[in-house]
Image (tube, rainbow, N blue to C red):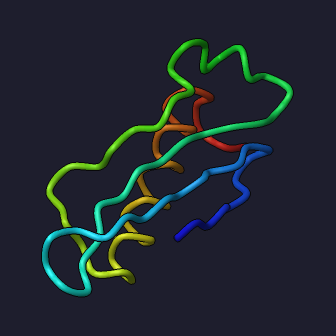
Amino acid sequence: MHRTIAYRDFEIQIELTSAADENTFDVTVQIRGATNLEVLGARGGRIPLRNGPFTERWAYLVAEIAGQAAIDVLLGPAD
């Protein structure tokens, strides 16, 4: 399952894959877009999130927060 979330001129792309347990998922995050993409450099690949698997709802929430935090670290606080 895929979801894309817009945040500060970037796209946070979230991908869920079924885990061993029923109704749980492993989740990866990828940050794309914006005019300052060079800030990401080679780090723009998919990042698997740790401490899973998660339920679907938690997987999307954790991935969105992780993606937003990564963008905030790279760009600094929003004005």
Residue 74: horizontal and vertical position, in percent? 55, 26
Number of numbered markers? 0
Q: Is residue 69 left or right of residue 48?
A: right
Residue 12: horizontal and vertical position, in percent? 61, 51
Front one among 15 and 35: 15
Tell me if residue 79 comes above or below residue 26 in the rendering. Answer: above
Q: Is residue 42 left or right of residue 21?
A: right
Residue 78: horizontal and vertical position, in percent? 67, 44
Q: Residue furthest right?
A: 35
Tell me if residue 39 comes above or below residue 44 in the rendering. Answer: above
Q: Residue at x 42, y 59 (%)?
A: 63
Answer with the quarter of the image where residue 22 lies: bottom left
Front one among 60 and 74: 60
Q: Residue at x 14, y 70 (%)?
A: 20
Q: Residue at x 58, y 66 (%)?
A: 2
Q: Residue at x 53, y 58 (%)?
A: 14
Q: Is residue 37 left or right of residue 29?
A: right
Residue 66: horizontal and vertical position, in percent? 41, 51
Which image quadrant: the C terminus? top right
Front one among 18 and 78: 18
